[in-house]
Image: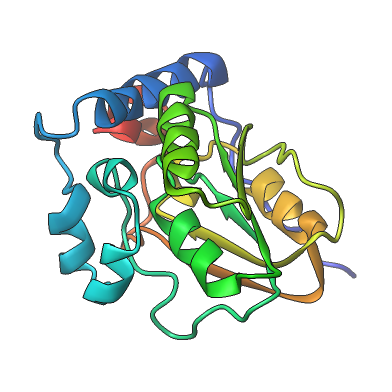
């Protein structure tokens, strides 16, 4: 007899309200990165996460100043020239620009983010730097605007924890990755299960 797996209870959460709250948080990181947040940002964060200085120096200043992540997806292994890369939740493009330099001249990077202000900053940085192998698109992690089996690698930095439907997000990652593709992500991990009631508190998602 097959044992039934108990599914977690459905969250009583307005996804639109949650997404708007998260967008507001990262709109502030894009427009005024020096104001101070409950997380580190910019150059200080990049150094805490042990990005090599030569990689930091390769990133346009406006992308660096609004960097907000939880780890370094390049720490274990660098990307290879010619690879196609998706940066899920790219923000202002800090990791996207590093990836674009690693995979050039024949590789390509697509950065996806749901916060227009972050995307505008990333696009302006790309134009100013003259980088032609990186593009930025508006979209959600649960609905990535990327073709099936397009990516050799998907990178993500501190984003999966902010997605309300993680199963849908993981299905999207599997969809856009080529067979045998690689997922490199850094994120927050908790030692104890988060209570169901806490998952329904939007303030806890953003703060």
Q: Name the one closer to the observer, 68 or 104.
A: 104
> For residue 11, which quarter of the picture?
top right
Measuring 61% from the left and 51% from the top, which residue is drawn there? 132
Give the vertical position of 171 relative to 106 (above or below).
Answer: above
Image coords of residue 83 (percent x, y): 69, 72
Image coords of residue 96 (percent x, y): 49, 55
* The C terminus lies in quadrant: top left
What count of labels does the image hold? 0
| 141 lies left or right of 150 | left
Image coords of residue 105 (percent x, y): 64, 70
> For residue 26, which quarter of the picture?
top left
Q: Name the one closer to the observer, 119 or 149.
A: 119
Measuring 33% from the left and 65% from the top, which residue is drawn there? 71
Give the vertical position of 125 relative to 167 (above or below).
Answer: above
> For residue 92, which quarter of the picture?
top left
Give the vertical position of 71 relative to 39 (above or below).
Answer: below
Measuring 27% from the left and 65% from the top, which residue is drawn there? 56
Residue 178 visible in the snapshot: yes
* The N terminus lies in quadrant: bottom right
| 161 lies left or right of 191 | right
Q: Residue furthest bottom?
A: 77
């Amino acid at each position: 007899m097959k044992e039934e797996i108990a599914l977690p209870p459905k969250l009583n959460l307005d996804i639109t309200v949650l997404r708007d709250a998260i967008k507001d948080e990262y709109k502030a990181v894009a427009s005024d990165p020096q104001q101070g947040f409950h997380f580190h940002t910019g150059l200080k964060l990049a150094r805490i996460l042990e990005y090599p200085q030569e990689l930091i120096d390769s990133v346009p200043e406006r992308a660096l100043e609004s960097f907000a992540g939880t780890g370094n997806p390049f720490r274990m292994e660098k990307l290879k020239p010619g690879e196609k890369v998706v940066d899920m939740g790219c923000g202002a493009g800090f990791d996207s620009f590093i990836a674009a330099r690693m995979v050039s001249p024949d590789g390509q990077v697509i950065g996806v983010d749901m916060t227009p202000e972050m995307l505008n900053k990333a696009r302006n940085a790309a134009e100013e730097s003259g980088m032609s192998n990186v593009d930025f698109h508006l979209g959600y992690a649960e609905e990535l605007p990327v073709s099936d089996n397009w990516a050799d690698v998907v990178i993500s930095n501190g984003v999966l924890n902010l997605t309300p439907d993680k199963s849908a997000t993981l299905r999207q990652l599997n969809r856009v990755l080529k067979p045998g593709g690689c997922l490199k992500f850094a994120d927050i991990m908790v030692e104890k299960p988060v209570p169901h009631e806490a998952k329904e508190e939007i303030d806890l998602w953003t703060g």
